[in-house]
Amino acid sequence: MVEFVFSEEQQDLRRGVRQFLAERSDEAAVRRLMDTDIGYDPAIWSRLGGELGVLGLAVPEALGGVGGTLVDQAVVAEEFGAALTPGPVFGTVSLAIPALVSLGGADDLLTALVEGTRTAALAVPDRAGRFDAGLVTVTESDGALTGEVRQVVDGSADVLLVAARTGSGVGLFAVEGGERIPLSTLDSTRRQATVRLHAAEGRLLATGAGAERAITHAFRVGAALLATEQVGGAQKLVDLTVAYAGTRLQFGRPIGSFQAVKHRCADMLVLVEHARSTAYHAVWTLQDASDGSAGDDPDLAVSIAQATCSEAYQRVALDTVQLHGGIGFTWEHPTHLYVKRSVTDAALLGSAAAHREHIAATVLDTAVSDGALVVAAG
Amino acid sequence: MDDHSELIEKTAREVVETHDPQSTPPREFLGAVYDAGLAWVHFPVGLGGLGVSRGLQAHADEVLQGAGGPIAFSLNPIGQGMAAPTLLEHAQPGLAAELLRPLATTEHIWCQLFSEPGAGSDLAGLATSAVQDGEEWVVNGQKVWTSLAHLARYALLLARTDPEQPKHRGLTYFVLDMQAPGVETRPLRQMTGQAEFNEVYLSDARIPDTHRLGAVGNGWRVAMTTLMNERSAIGGGSSVRGAGAIADAVELWARRPELHTAVLRDKLAALWTRAEAQRLTSARAGRAATSGSPGPEGSIAKLVSAELNQHVYEFCMELLGPEAALYGSYELHDVKRGEDYRGPVQQRFLRSRANTIEGGTSEVLRNILGERILGLPGDLRADSGKAWKDIPRG
């Protein structure tokens, strides 16, 4: 698999998903669903899983999956991001499925998630996109889980993968019950809930190193897929803005012919192209790591992608408002849906600043002077 | 593709085996590279190429340069980056065969006579005239920002052959012998104190019609070949993480821990990340363009690397504090190209200010991205359709 080169099959996959979403999950559908209690259409979700088979593309055959790659899943994530596809994309596709894959071993839950018949979310706090056992707020005692996890994305899902302190380190549990308190969110298409567990029943999936490995893997994959979702959304906005600037007339000419507008569009293009390169690089790096082949440092690649994509998507979204003028500030125009998604995504699994911190720690704090550069001394 | 890459690597290894890069004079080595078809692998056989995809050039360069062979591009950048593709595409029969080999060996250094004091971003408005006189053209005018003119044997020249036509249509493209009578080169001093560039005065300089590239009046289209290659050459950037200007900032950072602040650390992390995003974008564009001519993607690379260079050296100056106000020397010496980039960091800072001007200003590049890639409508032009001689200038 050559980095940045998509196969014919992957291009077909992209077209297929795009067409399905255009027909079944267009803007009108998104707006209708964002006013509902659960926020998505379970029938569409199960078709995405069962009929199109695009919710768990990177699940190995041994675990009952189709044995595709993370690149396949990233192609789909990009389309989900572009269409603001309602449903537990983040909780189920980006986090829970990768966590279960990392645990290995066939599991009915994994099968159900891939088929879209059940949904899941990862109820594990992260520190800037990395696992930190010190943040775990749930405690296991005699097999029962107690504690609160705040702001779990897709926290109303059927099953929660919950990290809890146990007598033998951190354990990862599958929890079906517990109290889910839906939160009023900036982005109505990406829901959050606070999870309260009072001696809730949980099925132990792994403890200690196995649990930490699964959570770390989920955070990495989740961040890479989130980055491709961000790319999809940002590209969609560039397309919207360019189309508008080419047709909206003021002073007797298309506004896109004014350099003040055109140059801002050019800057949006550069942001999206940079975001795309870093997101794809992260995806390919993680795929290389799963294949056991030598590649980039996965954590660094993910941080480069998240630092770049979070900033790019939000910048592009906010500039889309400006370049559309008044119409871009209205409820009826789609821009605000993307603005809210871009701000939300930027806050998930570490902000751009948090990932720059990772980058600085990796690259700058370890840099060694070779003394070659001259500083003039006057 | 795999077969071709193996053939290329094999051919390159043969060149290295028969011409030890350590003991063979660079011109002779580069001549062998040309004869083996490895100068530009996408060129035809017999003209320095093998007629394969240009994406495969890296396979040849890896072997040749890996063995310590000279880097032809850095010795003759305009020849390699711009003249060669333009000659291949537009030269009259026989001329490319005559000029490409000495270009490839660096026996002939090339320069570019495009910009004028009155024609920068609006290059098509240039005023240097070429008037036909039998089998020759007689050229008069002034060119500027000509790097390497003092060393060059040949120049790519864009001149006006019909002032009655609208500006784009009255231009013709030539190859000028820089040793011809009537060609005078003077160094042009820049804000760093050095003179990388020249002014070139053309006074009744004569060019044989056989050195015309493309049809009379078709010079603009030929120039586009050159400029697309220029931008892609300038913006090519490094394929190595952390290399290029950002390496200077990281080096200063590592060397001067006493100057560290959290604010500066975040600034540098942001610059490093942007440099990395651009490196990956160039790599991705390279994968996409395994064949064909460079497209507008080169304009992204040029735009970003120019602005990034400036931001990196601004960062260095901010990091240095009071030392930023010191300088090496403004004394003009006999400069080699690129010396400003290898000078002290304060000099590199000054030199970087040209990055967003040379090879297409950032403003023009944003127009190109907007119009050619995004398809936005062009700006209104006050000179549209007017004969060149009637366009106000100044």
Image (cartoon, rainbow, N blue to C red):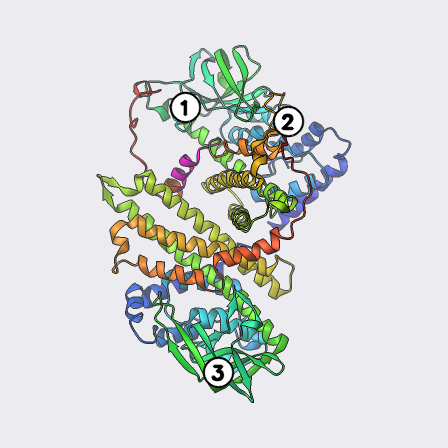
Q: Which mark, residue B106?
A: 2
Circle 3 SS class: strand
Lower position in the chain sequence, tag 1 or tag 2: 2
Which mark identifies residue A269? Answer: none
Q: What is the quadrant of the C terminus of chain A in the image?
A: top right
Crowd around label 2: few <14 · some 14–19 · many ≥20 (10 Å): many
Callout 3 amino acid:
Val
Q: Which residues are magenta?
A: B357-369
Residue at horizontal 51 percent and vertical 84 percent from the top: A145
Q: Are marks 1 and 2 in contact (CB under 8 Å)?
A: no
B363 in magenta: yes
**Residue A188 position within the rendered picture, expressed as x and y whole percent measured from the top left:** 34, 68
Identify residue for label 1: B119
State whether residue A37 appears in this view.
Answer: yes
Which one is nearer the viewer's eye here, B372 or B196? B196
Prevailing secondary structure class for the magenta stretch in the rendered image: helix
Marks 3 and 2, how far apart in space?
72 Å
Q: Amino acid at mark 2?
A: Thr
> Which of B321/A341 is in front?
B321
Amino acid, disc 1: Ala
Relative to B159, residue A355 above or below: below
Decide: is B357 above or below A325: above
Residue annotated with mark 3: A175
Q: Are marks 1 and 2 on the same chain?
A: yes
